Structures are given as structure tokens and as C-alpha cells.
Amino acid sequence: MTIRTEPMTVNVGPQHPSTHGVFRVRITFDGEDIVEVEPVFGYLHRGTEKLAEERNYVQVVTLTDRLDYTSSMINNQAYCIAVERLLGVEPPPRAKYLRTLTAELQRIAAHLIAVGFFVQELGAFGTPLMYAFRSRERILELFEMLCGARITVSYMRPGGVFADAPREFWPALDRFLEDFEVEFAEMEQLLLENEILMIRTRGVSPIPPEVAVNNSVSGPVLRASGVNWDWRKQDPYDAYDQVEFDVPVGSHWDNYDRFWVRIQEVHQSLRIIRQCIEQIEPGPARLELPLVLRPDPGREAYGRVEASKGELAFYLVSDGGIAPYRCKIRSPSLINLTIIEELLVGWKLADMIVSLGSIDINMGEVDR
Amino acid sequence: MAVREWAGQELSEALRRELPEAVEGFDETAAWVNPSQVGAAAIFLRDEPSLDFRFLNSITAIDYVEYFDVVYHLTSLKQQWCAVFKTRLYGRQDLSLPSVYQVWKGADYQEREIWDLMGVYFEGHPNMKRIMLWEGFEGHPLRKDFL
């Protein structure tokens, strides 16, 4: 005997503990299987692009902190690179190294959140997430030393960073690296080969490379789909052409690979940080630029970086005024969500939250 | 090894060979495409092996009051190069462009966002509605005359 079922539509979010903010998705289920998915955006829309048109070029830096608030440093970096391209200037070498170093620290912090919540959503409540937060806290303390803020850092400026690192920063960074090695190894031992985690995520929601590319997916999600593409390698900015690192690439394209790629990227970030500490030399940390910047009218620049979620780019157009005429933000979180249908349709309710966690969205960046 | 950026002239010549009616000109960084030909140009840019632009980075619209520019940033992951093409729409009422959703699905949310915030409609998009704001909202807030 077969039991006839009727499709049922369920609203997940915008108030849901595991949607990483105010994300709402309307899902139609047939029994336990997902048959239709419709994401609904806009609950955190603040009009950042419009606000940027009302502020001068330096002030816009503070707006970028509030996009993906788990990786503010990298947002600062993307914006500053776009402004520097617009002006046709280059920051001094020390500034480049400081930016690379802080961006990699931020990448570790962001990936720790991604991995921590991913495991939390699998049902490992509390412990692994607290392990991740313990280490992240140390990184935020380092940021506090640099600029006084922990989340909304605004540390970088067009032409460099706002101030050189204080003397006590360097020994604190060494201590962090020493401790983090142990802490992260502990976390890896807990998670990487964990049988429950493997069973729940291996082979779930694979995204083939050609689908990922057609959907403009970028970052760890693209690399987990087997595409070797990292803007730090393909279009090196700041000091990335001076350091050596590998690009981890997934081979199964599934939820486990998306988790695994982030774990491996943390190791590569540590490698980059060590090389930065070795190579950095004394010198100015900021280019002397006028307080109010006026790029030539008609100029435009597309400044992009490899952010923790993917390709983050600022497309700036100048009309000769003190504020950008247009400031488009290419946000990786929003565009990575394009694959939500391929990711969820045909899979079970129980995998839905995990798959969503595996693309690691941040609503501040999705809605802007 | 850095990606190569196509000059506007280079791209416009490559397009002109196959689609002479689509190209309107070029500037330093971008080729200019006739608005009605965006769909054909997109298919050609993606499928022609000597171009191979399979990855759509971003779509942007800019309001210049008398006209709107729509900018497409493309990348070929295989050939490791990037290119930009632009198109210009005159006027402020009933603006529309062919959608590239069927060519690059990554255009989905970005085209909806441009409709929502800039008021440029994309013909042929299967789900063309507002994305950030609610249905029934009046006006397009990223336009220069919206305050």
C-alpha cells in the first residue's frame, strides 16, 4: 500500500537559529524530500551602495565593515584596492604586508566561524563551536591591539593602513600562532575524520564544477567543486605575489569537501602569516594622500579580492567629486546562493540546514 | 601568474567578426554592445572557444540621468583572462534589456537587484521581481532622482 502525501510549504526564517542571520527560504516538501526552494531576501537591506554615494572615499571604509561582519578586514582591503586603482596609486610595501597579514588572520577567524557553525548544524551542539570561538577570540584581541575595534575594524585606508602595528602586537601574534597550532590540531582531530560527520556530509549535495561556474559561485564553494581558482593566485594583490601557498581543491564536490577546503585554507593562511612576519620590513605604513580624495572624472575601477566567502569586488565610478558616483558591491554570499536549488532540491529536510551551512552565507553581505 | 585583461578594442574586434551588428564601439577597457544584441553577444562570448567567458563576475547598472549604463564583467577560468562589455540605455521610463539568465545562471539575483534598485527590466528572466524591497514599493532607490 502506498500512502499518498501532499506537498507542504514551510517557511524557514527569517527568525531561525541556524540560517546565519535573517535569511528566509520558502521550501516545499513532499514528505521529507525538498521539491521547491525559494529564497526571500531583504530583511537586512540597508542600502549600503546608496549610502556610499553620500560619503567621501575614506568614510566609505566604515560601511564596508558592516557587509560581512565576520571578515571586516578583507572587506576593507577590497574597497581600498578599488580606490587605489581608481587613483592609480600603490601603498608602500610595509602596508601591503600588514594588510596581507591581517586579512589572513581574518580569514582564519571567518573560517573558524564557518566550520564551527557547520558542525553545530550537524547536531554537535556547543563544544566544537566553542573551540572555534576560543581561537577566534584571540584573533579579535590582536585586532583590538591594531585599531581598538574587534569586529568593525576600519583598519585599512586607501593608500595603506591607518596606523602601523604597535610594538606589543608582534610578540602577541607569535604567542597566538604557537597556541593556535595546538588548538587547531585538537579541533581537526575531533572533526576531520569524525565518523558521524563523514556519514552525514559525504556525498550530500554535490555541485559539479560546470554548474558551479555557470552559477558564478566563487571562493571555498567553487574550490570544493574541483575548480582551482583563487584570486590571491590568479590576480595577486597586496603581498600575495611574495608569499607561497597552495590552493586546496575538493574532489567529491559535496558538503564534506566544502568543510574540508575551509580547514585546509586555515593551514595555508598560517603559512602566509609566517612568511609575512619573516619578510616584513620597517617603513611607512601609509601613503601620504590628501584627506579628501578626488579621482579624475570618468574613471572607473574594479577592485577585487579573495574574501573568506569568495570573490568580493567593489566597482567604483568617479565623477570627479569627493564621493563615489557609483559603488557596486559584488557580494560573494549573495551570488553563491544562486546554487541553492541545485543544493537542496531532491535532498532531505535533515540535510537542508547542513547544506546551507556549507555555503557559509552572511546576511550582512547578502542584503547589504 | 596574473589574469590577462582584454582591452576594449580587442574584444570589440572579436565580437565584430561574428556579430557585426552587435558592436557599437569600444573604450579603453570595454566593448560597447547594442542593447538589443546583449543576449546574442552573451551566447557568443560564452561558447566561442577562443573567448570562453564561462564565468560572469558581476552585472552593474549606473544611472547617468540621461542614460543608464549596464556593465558586465566576465572571466574565463580556463584561459585565465577577463573582459568587460557595456551597453547603454537612453531615457528613464520603460527600460529593458534581454536577460542573460539562460547563458549565465549567476545573473539571476543580480538582474533582479538591478530591476529592484535601478529600474532596468530584464526580458526573459523567469522570475523577474523585486529582490531586496517588497512588491508594491514605489520607485527604484539607487536612481539619482530617488531621495
Image (cartoon, coloured by chain):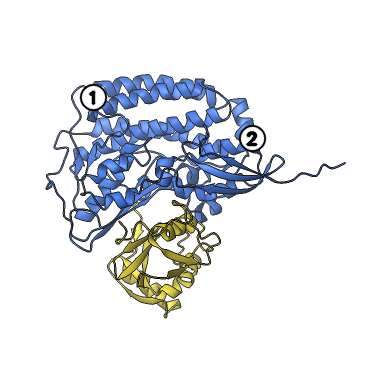
Residue A346 in the figure: left or right of residue A123: right
Disc 2 is attached to a residue of which chain? A
State whether residue A218 appears in this view. Answer: no
Q: Earlier in the sequence, mark 1 or mark 2?
A: 1
Q: Residues within 10 Å of mark 2 (few under 14, many from 20)?
A: few
Secondary structure of the residue carrying numbered label 1: helix
Q: Nearer the viewer, residue A152 or B146?
A: B146
Q: Which mark is residue A304?
A: none
- Mark 2 is on which residue type? Ala
Q: Nearer the viewer, residue B134 or A228?
A: B134
- Residue depicted at x 53% and y 67%: B124
Q: Position of residue A76 (x, y in %)?
A: 29, 42
| Disc 1 packing (10 Å; few <14; some 14–19; many ≥20) | some
Provide the residue designation for mark 2: A350
Q: Residue at x 38, y 26 (%)?
A: A136
Which shade of the palette goes to chain A? blue
Disc number for residue A169: 1
Q: Is residue A275 visible?
A: yes
- Foreground of the two, B82 or A49: A49
Q: CA distance from mark 1 to mark 2?
A: 44 Å
Quarter containing the N terminus of chain A: top right
Q: Residue furthest right?
A: A1
Q: Decide: marks 1, 2 in contact (CB < 8 A)?
A: no
Q: Is residue A322 above or below residue B94?
A: above
Chain painted in yellow in the figure? B
Q: Position of residue B139 (x, y in %)?
A: 39, 60
Looking at the rendered structure, the number of numbered marks drawn on it comes to 2
Read off the chain for label 1: A
